[in-house]
Structures are given as C-alpha cells and as structure tokens.
Amino acid sequence: DFHWLDEKEEWFWLSNVRKNRLFNQIEKILTVTKQIDIANLRQAARRNYRMKGFAPPRAILLEYCHQNDDIVVDGQMISFRSGYKPNRVFAETETILLEVLKANDSVMKREDFEREALLRGMNRTTFFMYLDNSPIITRFAKGVYGIPGTILPPGLVDSLTPKIRRSKVLKDFGWNDDGSVWIEYSLSANSVTSGLVTLP
C-alpha cells in the first residue's frame, strides 16, 4: 500500500490507511463544490483545525489526486469520478452554514452571513470558529465568505467587500478624583463583534 508522490523529496502515502485526514477534507470540499482547481482545493483543505494550517504543496496534492481512484484530475481541475457517492454527513452547524450560503448565491458579506446563521439558532462563538476553520467555507476577500470553488461574476466580490471608514473612536479620557480612569469611547462594529477596545 506504499506509493511515492515524489521520491526525491520523500513524499508518499499509504493507500490502506482507512482514516486519511487529507482525503476526508477533499471529500468534504468536493461534496459541496463538485469541481475545484488545485490551488483552491489546497487552500480549503488546510483550513480545518485538524490540519493545523498544513496542506501538501500543489504538485504533491495534484499527484495524490492522480493516484486516488475516486478522484478525477482534468488539468488543474479536481472532481469525483462519475458515480462516486461521498460517505459524508455534515454536522448540524455546517449544514446551517451551507444552507445560508446556498440561499444567497454561495457568497455573502460576513455581517449578513453571521446575522442569518444566528437567526437560525447558531451560537456566535460557534459561527466564528467554523468561519475560521471549516474547509467548506472560503474567504474571497476581507469580510466576504462563500463556498469554495464558486464561480463568481466579475465585480461581485468587490461590491460586497466592506468599505473601510476611518473614524476616531476614542473621544476623550481622564482621571476621577478617586484615582480611577474614565474614558469616552464610540463603539465600532468591530468592537461590538470582538468585545475588544483599546485603552490609551
């Protein structure tokens, strides 16, 4: 069951290992997107916390896909072979996130995505955990998320990207007679979301 992926660089895989973490990520991604290019597949696969930010280099990942009987490689595009049925059941949280994205053309502003997920009963902490770690969600730009491999019309991501508005949130500060500090602060949307403010 030993197969070289790159003998010179000593990359290999064992085909008889039943719990292949890399294949699990690929299966998850291809279940929601059907077809994806190798660069985006690699980016999506490394998001899961179990991968600890790691994914093989593109050439190695492409060779792995070539050698896997369940995967079809067409140039740089990756998909399942015809008739392959993924043994993939998504957790309730990921199911909710997928439903929200699919109901909104597979791409959304983060604020809208968060609001709709919370309306469906999701916890905010859970939302952000999956937003950062799920392989079935990708960040197209700052504040814009969607399903990996989604073909988007030109200009859509730019139109959804939040415009940065610089404003002075710290208004004033000083000391009270008893030695305690007072601060006047205008809460930004980011402060409300993160629960963090800076102190002078």
Image (tube, grey):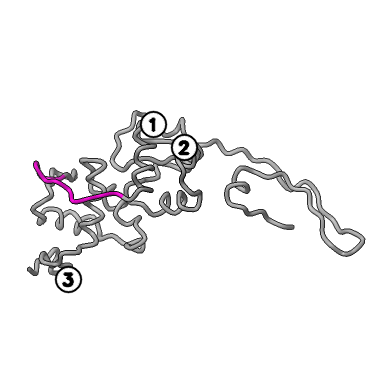
Quadrant of the rendering where the C terminus is positioned: bottom right
Marking on residue 104? 1
Question: Which residue in the structure is indicated by mark 2?
Answer: 116
17 on left or right of 195: left
* Among numbered discs 1 and 2, the one appearing first in the sequence: 1
Marking on residue 10? 3
Q: Answer whether labels 1 and 3 touch (C-beta < 8 Å).
A: no
Give the class, few, some or many, for how many residues have Cα within 10 Å of label 2's Cα (few <14, many ≥20): some
* Among numbered discs 2 and 3, the one appearing first in the sequence: 3
Q: Please determine whether, in this image, residue 21 is positioned above or below residue 26.
A: below
Of 129 and 157, which appears nearest the observer?
129
Q: CA distance from mark 1 to mark 2?
A: 10 Å
The image position of residue 139, as x and y in percent, is: 40, 45
Q: Answer whether labels 2 and 3 touch (C-beta < 8 Å).
A: no
Which amino acid type corresponds to the residue marked 1 in the rendered image?
Asn
**Count of residue discs:** 3
Q: CA distance from mark 2 to mark 3?
A: 46 Å
Q: Residue 75, located in which quarter of the rendered image?
A: top left
Residue shown at 62% from the left, 46% from the top:
192
The image position of residue 18, as x and y in percent, is: 15, 64
Q: Answer whether labels 1 and 2 touch (C-beta < 8 Å).
A: yes
Q: Please determine whether, in this image, residue 19 is positioned above or below residue 90.
A: below
Q: Residue 104, located in which quarter of the rendered image?
A: top left
The image position of residue 131, as x and y in percent, is: 42, 49
Q: CA distance from mark 1 to mark 3?
A: 44 Å
| Bounds of the magenta segment | 80-90
